[in-house]
Amino acid sequence: MSPTLQLEISAICIIHIIAIVLSVICLAVFTMKSRRDDPSANAFLVLQGAMTLWMVFKVLKTVSPDITLRWIFILGYYACTCVVEAAFIEFGHAYARGTRLSRKIRPLVYGLPVLQFSWILTNPLHFLFYGHYDFYGDSFGPLFYVHMLIEYTYFGVGLYYCRLRFKKEFSTRNRAVTWIVSTAILVPLFLNCLYITKVLHTLTFMARIPVIFDITPIVFTWSTLLFMYATFNHDLFSLTPLMRHEITHHLNLPIALFNRRFRLGYTNGAFQALFTSGRAMDDFLATLPEQTQKSGESGFEACIGDASFVVSCRKIRTVTGGQHLVTLRNVTQYKAIQADIVAGQEKIEEKNRRVNETIRQLKELSKGSARKFVARELHDIIGHSLVAAIKLLEVARIYGPHDSTRGLPALTHAVTALDTGLSGIKSVPESREESGRITGEELKKEIDELMEQARRTGLDASLNLQGMIYLLEPALYTTLHRTCTEIITNCLKHADATRLFLSVKIRETHAHLMAVDNGKGARTLIPGSGLLGMEERARALGGEAHFNSEDGFMTRITIPRQGELSVP
């Protein structure tokens, strides 16, 4: 065996084996990820498999030890070419039309490759396809050129179908991908034509390259890699890959995929289960383009059966110019929560109207010092109940659509806060004639209720009350209770605080109250009606009130008392 022949055999084997490995990898990836119900993908799989076998037979033919085996591998070689031409026209038709060839055309399309192979199979009887064949060169008869004419005709028809799809779907901004796909189809055919017409041989000899062989299968491998890139990065076949299909098909979220003209391409199981009949789905799909155009990507609400959904449509850029991904989110439960919130708000508004009416009546009845007393009492009682209710409504608004276990209880607590305020208003006239004494334990219980109400709004509030054994004179009890109420109200309304510490110490000679929060404070303290009311209450009992707003807000109040006896 000459050195040139050894070099040529080695080059053919090494290069083709590398191409075969790459082709098998591409074939495996495409098989795993392509949809089984897409005819263009199935035809491409057949095309890919036939071309891979073509290269395998090419290597086996090259290393065959005798003429008989070489002839067998040549038959396998040309059987693959006959399959390739039929698979390519099937692929082009399915890619352009979305369906397989009609049953009337199939016998002709598949019959000609069978006839072509019969020429090769019976060549030893007539020698009209091969005049002779060996490693260095082949002498072809007239049937070979008829075979090539039919093969290129098949490729031409397949290219025509592909061009129909390219022209219909590809946009100008995807022109680069169009050229990549077109090159992947045309380059192997062009090089094969150069090889058959011996032009490639001439160019090789002119370049002084000692090795010459048919490189069409190798170029095909390069074309396959380009096809894989275009398929899985630019949705060349408008496929839903198998792995993504398996995931989306079992999701509870209804998903549908449309082309840019809103023609349905894919739906998962959850989407199909929404509609009890095909007519219901048709009605929904008929209104989808118009509703999407009005709402944009923000989505719109739609009722399907007894359920409410938010329909969202997002555009996806692909090689075909764009698709629409439509998802439906079930908001039936949120709608029910929203209805409960609205009903709760209506009740609160009604109670607010009653509160305002009560305030108006009390203001009309108040005169002189009684007017001032009632105004201060109303400020403390109503201010706290309304602030607490507003904060609880904010909690309901935040958690209501997502967490009904936190949203609905917040509404109930808001109503309770307003009811407490109404009860306090009714007791205002009676508080002018305070009688009897109250223990420090009862005071702690009532302040604890205020603190618990504040905690429901998210405030970390803690209380330290000492001296629960003492009996409190009514005026001291009212002052301490109203002052604590005002402190909590201010913390919720103005301070933007997250923590509040309240300390009440009751002794025989005096009562001391201190409150500290971590709110925003203020550089310049301008007392409002709440702080002025606390100062007036303390001064009325001979006490003092001090405020500091440099770091958070701190209140210190000291009130003397007459040494009341402890509880026996």
Image (cartoon, helix red, strand yellow):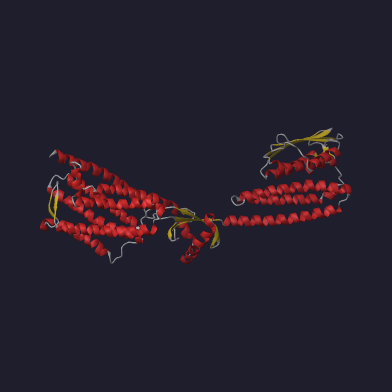
Whether residue 435 is situated above or below residue 115 in the rendered picture: above
296, above or below 434, in the image: below
Image spot of residue 113 (x, y percent)? 22, 59
- Taking depth in this image into account, of 310 and 250 the one nearest to the observer is 310
Q: In this view of the protein, which residue sits in the foreground, 96 or 102? A: 96
Residue 448 seen in render: no
Residue at the far front: name it. 206
Q: Quadrant of the N terminus?
A: top left
- Does 181 sit left or right of 501 as displayed? left
**In this view, 427 is above or below 116:** above
Of the 4 image quadrants, the one containing the C terminus is top right
As drawn, which residue projects farthest toward the right?
A: 368
When asked about the image quadrant of residue 497, the answer is top right
Residue 120: % across, % down: 16, 56
Q: Is residue 476 left or right of residue 287?
A: right
- For the image, the number of numbered tags is 0
Question: Where residue 234 sits in the image (x, y, percent)?
Answer: 39, 51
Determine if residue 263 is in view: yes
Q: Position of residue 264 (x, y in %)?
A: 43, 60
